Image (tube, helix red, strand yellow):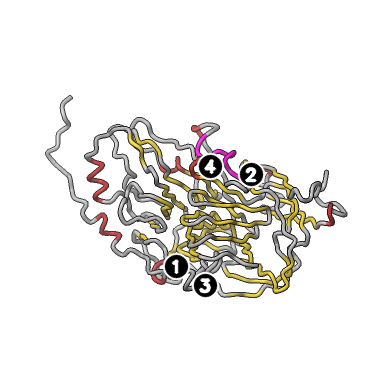
Amino acid sequence: MAGFKYMSGFGNEFSSEDPRCPGSLPEGQNNPQVCPYGLYAEQLSGSAFTCPRPANKRSWLYRILPSVKHKPFTAVPCGNLTENWNEVEPDPNQLRWLPFTIPKSTEKKVDFVAGLHTVCGAGDAKSRNGIGIHVYTCNTSMVDRCFNNSDGDFLIVPQQGKILITTEFGKIMVEPNEICVLQQGMRFSVDVFGETRGYILEVYGAHFELPDLGPIGANGLANPRDFLCPVAWYEDRTVATGYTVINKYQGKLFSCQQGFSPFNVVAWHGNYTPYKYNLENFMVINAVAFDHADPSIFTVLTAKSTRPGVAIADFVIFPPRWGVADRTFRPPYYHRNCMSEFMGLIKGHYEAKEEGFQPGGASLHSAMTPHGPDAECFEKNSAAELQPERVAEGTMAFMFESSFSMAVTKWGLQTCQKLDKSYYQCWESLRSHFNPNWKPSKK
């Protein structure tokens, strides 16, 4: 977007100075006895010091005052943000939600943090192994307060309304059909421009990376050059009434006060940064003869587990593309999966369920729960003339896929009042086409 500058590349070694302070990055070392401009040096580590070099994540920040200058943290209400996966009994059913309600600003001012709602998740932030899936619904900007996630990374998927994210590394404008990743420990504040909604995939204990391409080769899917990282920007601002830092720690929220803005980083360098990506830049790979390739070909980012080929979580999209497969039922196939599949819709109509699955809503098909095209989709596409066609034009659906068997929260099942209890009916009219007298046609 015009007016915002970025550096491109995924996981690069970046360096950036606010142009108001040229020479603010120390030369030849990270931690000089006296930093340029009288700044403080502070390292932000996203991995253990001894991680192998390809996995070692850290950045050096040169700031007006260090992060440690704050009053003690105290517990604050968590609202609808939770890591309690035992609030309600497990539910293995196919679940679908209507669009989540955005509060009206005329009724109640709700910022990004107050508007966080946990839908489902699994695992444990203490042991650094698990995920949380949240939605955010808000209508007002954060004022003199920022958020810091000590538990893991946030992958943010805006659905309605652009968001301006101010970070310690600089500013990022993120619009629907873009995503942003704010990694563990990075402080940020969110400005909104009206009624705003989106989805969040939180991962504990692993960072997102680009999936391996294997036989695809060196290029394809999400290309590293299309990821954008902000440039340094600082504010030297004191806040007499107190600036609030909200810290998510072990699934709970805490806050502390300090007398200055945390966005006081004049310069920084390293490879541990926030970043954004435009989903329109995804290079789609597809089947061009017959049958389906598995949906893993649509993976944008992955957070790997310790088991080869098994993800803690994958972020997968279903973008506009050409469908050309012959002799093939082209929509997604009927499926039972050892993974959990949470889907959201940014815009348009999802190809396998053109009715009911709406932008701003969601669905969850848990481990081994059957799912697939509704009856209307099956009948229509079983009889369709197979010509090359554009699929999902004007649409962007996505999936958070995880090896965890996720629990749905009380808010997701009850409080939000958006669960579509008629969802199962979309398969009720599926009928048998079995013909025991069928014979292959003579060629």
Q: Nearer the viewer, mark 4 or mark 2?
A: 2
Q: Is residue 149 left or right of residue 214?
A: right
Q: Secondary structure at mark 2?
A: loop
Q: Residue furthest top?
A: 443
- C-alpha gap between disc 1 and disc 3: 13 Å
Q: Of the residues under marks 4 and 1, which one precedes in the sequence?
A: 4
Q: Is residue 362 left or right of residue 300?
A: left
Q: Secondary structure at mark 1?
A: loop
- C-alpha gap between disc 4 and disc 1: 30 Å
- C-alpha gap between disc 1 and disc 2: 34 Å
Q: Of the residues under marks 1 and 2, which one precedes in the sequence?
A: 2
Residue type beneath disc 3? Gly
Residue type beneath disc 2? Gly
Q: Which residue is mark 1?
A: 409
Q: Position of residue 101 (x, y in %)?
A: 42, 65
Q: Tell whether position 61 is magenta.
A: no
Residue type beneath disc 1? Thr
Q: Which residue is mark 2?
A: 11
Q: Position of residue 116 (x, y in %)?
A: 51, 65
Q: Nearer the viewer, mark 4 or mark 3?
A: 3
Foreground of the two, 357 or 309:
357
Residue 438 vertical position relative to residue 165 in the rendered view, above or below: above
Residue that appears at 55% across and 46% down: 277
- C-alpha gap between disc 4 and disc 3: 35 Å
Q: Secondary structure at mark 4?
A: loop
Foreground of the two, 181 or 54:
181
Q: Which residue is mark 3?
A: 79
Considering the image in quadrants, where does the C terminus appear?
top left
